[in-house]
Image (tube, rainbow, N blue to C red):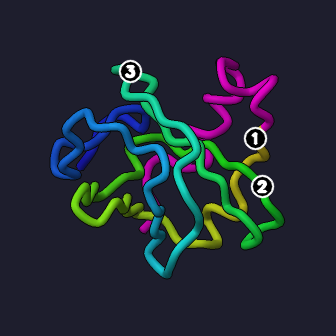
Amino acid sequence: MQENAWDYPSAAGYTGSDLTGFQVEALDGDIGKVDKHTDEVGSACLVVDTGPWIFGREVLIPAGSVTQVDTDHKKVFLGLTKDQVKGAPEFHRETHHDSADYRRQLTAFYWPPRI
């Protein structure tokens, strides 16, 4: 089991490639595209643009939620359901990206994995 919500699990196959534009798949279907990502140790995450699925909202997802990176098909798979992503704390790029309080809130929401 992945010990840290903010690092890519070694089993996911992330090799340091740019994930921008990759499709993002929840356990029960497509949720959008990677708008931005970081692979900084201890704070790795994806910013996912959900498009019309949840009214164009962006969500920040800790890298520990990634179960597989498929670079051939440009897809990132999550160990989360659509409802979990939809219920995530709201993300505002201007105020939340570097906020320690927001990251604590996300860690409490996503971690440990419930599925």
Relative image position of residue 106 (x, y in whole percent): 62, 40
Left or right of 90 in this view: 43: left
- Mark closest to the chain's N terminus, 3 or 1: 3
Between 11 and 109, the residue placed more toward the observer is 11
How far apart are the two marked residues, 3 and 1, measured between alpha carbons? 19 Å
Q: Which residue is mark 1?
A: 91
Rendering coords of residue 12 (x, y %): 22, 52
Looking at the rendered structure, the secondary structure element under dot 2 is loop
Q: For the residue carrying disc 2, how many other residues have a C-alpha within 10 Å: few (<14), some (14-19), or many (20+)? A: some
Image mark for residue 48: none
Callouts 1 and 2 close, C-beta under 8 Å:
yes
Q: Kindly report the distance in space between the C-alpha atoms of the residues bearing marks 1 and 2.
A: 8 Å
Q: How many marks?
A: 3
Find disc 3 in the rendering and name its residue: 40
Mark 1 or mark 2: whose residue is earlier in sequence? 2
Which stretch is magenta?
92-115
- Residue 8 x, y percent position in the rendering: 31, 39
Determine the residue positioned at 66% across, 54% down: 49
Q: Amino acid at mark 3?
A: Glu
Q: Secondary structure at mark 1?
A: loop
Q: Which residue is mark 2?
A: 57
Query: Residue at image x 74%, y 47%?
Result: 89
Please check the rendered image and state whether residue 10 is part of the magenta-colored stretch, yes or no: no
Write the residue at 36% across / 52% down. 66
- For badge 1, the amino acid type reads Phe
